[in-house]
Image (cartoon, rainbow, N blue to C red):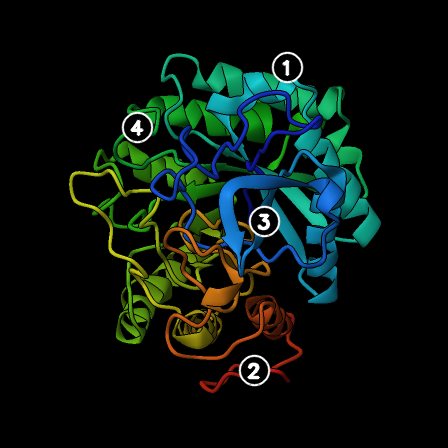
Amino acid sequence: MGYQGWFDCPSENAPKNPWSHWARRGLTPDDITVDMFPDLSEFDKADLCALPGFTIEGKQAYLYSAWAPKIVDRHFRWMKDASLDGVLVQRFLSDIPRRRATGDVVLKNIIAAAKANGRVFAIEYDVSGANPEKFFDIMSEDWQYLVHDLKITAQPGYLHHKGKPVLSVWGMGFLDRHPPEDPAVAKRAVAWFKSGAPEECRVTYMGGVPSRWRTLAGDSRKEEGWAEVYAMMDVIQPWTVGRYGNLEGVDKWKNEAIVPDLAATKETGQLYMPVVFPGFSWANLNRNATKPAKQNQIPRLGGQFLWRQAVDARNAGATVLKIAMFDEVNEGTAVMKVAAKRTEAPEQGYWLTLDADGMNLPNDWYLKLSGEITMMFHGKRQPREEMPIKPGK
């Protein structure tokens, strides 16, 4: 799964950016930037932040900060309880200076939580919005800092493949605000991480690439040189969130993209990692857009949408999978425990809860379903169209 870990709220642990990614500055219902409300019933109030002006059934509403170690540890305990393998930790290049200046607290929380709960993790750099002139220098210098100073690849939970640490770089090759534009620059970046870096910093390179990477169409840059960039990567992870929105679209994507993608990567000896997502909604995040986003834009269908994607990927021949995401409540793709009923979210504002499609689901439904998907990809469960679990079972 992907793990954002970017949520802050006013506390001694988070020295800057209070309410970062939860809300805009005003903290009114119109300022909220998440659609799903996290279920916080298992957390101590002392580890949470009161959300001013918001109540749940007349009582004060709270949110959390990933800067608090107990919060992150609980998240990883949920992963352990659901038998989920672990996460790709999102590390935005634009946010690295702040993270490092304040001690990389969230990353250290993740390292500790992965160790305590026996889960794996790996870094996934996100180049979105990064300075095109400096993005590689920032990324390569930071990776050396993580390896040499934080000893991150020596941590017991750090993910390795074929004797090398796994590193994912998400966003190269995408159109619009994703550097670099020149595929030659991207080739140099991939080559450095694979073979040009100091030996202890060399990696199994995973590319978070456009969904149409193979055909250089759609969301991919069109220059022929990008095909050479993608061919250099050890693992191909195409971004599919929002590329289809119903079960028919899921099946169509399998036939038009996943099957030929797998054939292409088999020829080149690359590992292919499809991305699946439970649903999508970013109405609050895009409330002020010229064309406001639709509420519950891609319905979850009680889990059928996520399950069908995973079954299709497995039946097509995929052996590994990424679920987007663990904690992404901004875009409504979170699989962690969230408010299941509208009455469990704040009375103020719009919230997408698990009963939005008329189904009575427990707050951990998508953790359990993700666990079933994990079992399927570990070969412990056969793929079948019917979901293997029922609410409350």
Residue drawn at x 45%, y 49% is 237
Residue drawn at x 33%, y 35% is 173
Q: Tag 4: residue type?
A: Arg
Measured as percent of width and height from the top left, residue 126 is found at 47, 33
Q: In which quarter of the image is residue 50?
A: top right
Mark toward the viewer: 2 or 3? 3
Mark pair 4, 1: CA separation: 25 Å
Is residue 44 rendered to the left or right of residue 389? Answer: right
Q: In which quarter of the image is residue 158?
A: top right
Residue position marked by numbered label 1 in the rendering = 101
Which of 88 and 37 lies nearest the eye of the viewer?
A: 37
Mark toward the viewer: 4 or 1? 1
Q: Tag 1: residue type?
A: Ala
Density class for disc 4 (Cα within 10 Å; few <14, some 14-19, many ≥20) is some
- Numbered badge on residue 177: 4
- Numbered badge on residue 182: none
Quadrant of image for the C terminus: bottom right
- Numbered badge on residue 60: 3
Of mark 4 and mark 1, the one earlier in the sequence is: 1
**Relative to 320, residue 90 above or below:** above
Measured as percent of width and height from the top left, residue 96 is found at 55, 21
Of mark 3 and mark 4, the one earlier in the sequence is: 3
